[in-house]
Image (cartoon, helix red, strand yellow):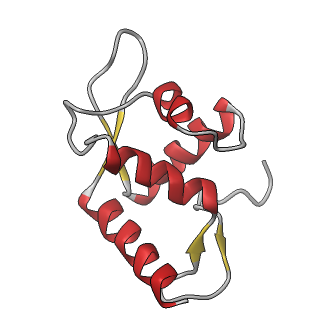
Amino acid sequence: MPGNTGKIRETPGGEGGGILDKSSFIILSILRGNGADSRLSGMTALEVSMEEDLGVALDTVYRKIRRFEQAGYVGKGMKDGKANTYYITQEGLGRLEKERNWTDEA
């Protein structure tokens, strides 16, 4: 896809590159809220998409998670059958907290 840099979609503004869009913020929040913070406790993209109505297709959830993985916000966990699982990393927790703080200040 031309112009696709593999970066997380962000809106302009904010320190360090902008603000995550709503569905990206929710995905990180779901991983954190469900204790998916290690390789052993990861969640599949389907499990993430079923936790809350994100208003996006499963393919979109999967693409966002893969971009989070490339950005270092999410790590790949142990397989669940044939499905990959994912967990929020320390960097992802930091980014989520940064977004929460920005939201509180706005």
> Residue 17: which quarter of the image?
bottom right
Q: Position of residue 94 (x, y in %)?
A: 31, 70
Residue at image location 57% in from the left, 36% down from the top:
62
> Residue 7: which quarter of the image?
bottom right
Please identify the residue farthest to the top as the structure is shown.
Answer: 81
Residue at image location 61% in from the left, 53% down from the top:
23
Residue at image location 46% in from the left, 74% down from the top:
99
Q: Position of residue 47 (x, y in %)?
A: 46, 27
Q: Position of residue 33 (x, y in %)?
A: 33, 48
Please identify the residue farthest to the right as the structure is shown.
Answer: 2
- In the displayed structure, 55 sits above or below 72; it is above
Residue 22 or residue 10, whichever sits in front: 22
Side (left or right) of 65 relative to 32: right
Residue at image location 37% in from the left, 57% down from the top:
72
- In the displayed structure, 18 sits above or below 47; it is below
Quick one: quadrant of the C terminus? bottom right
Residue 6 or residue 10, whichever sits in front: 10
> Residue 20: which quarter of the image?
bottom right
Side (left or right) of 38 relative to 23: left
Side (left or right) of 103 relative to 74: right
- In the displayed structure, 10 sits above or below 34; it is below
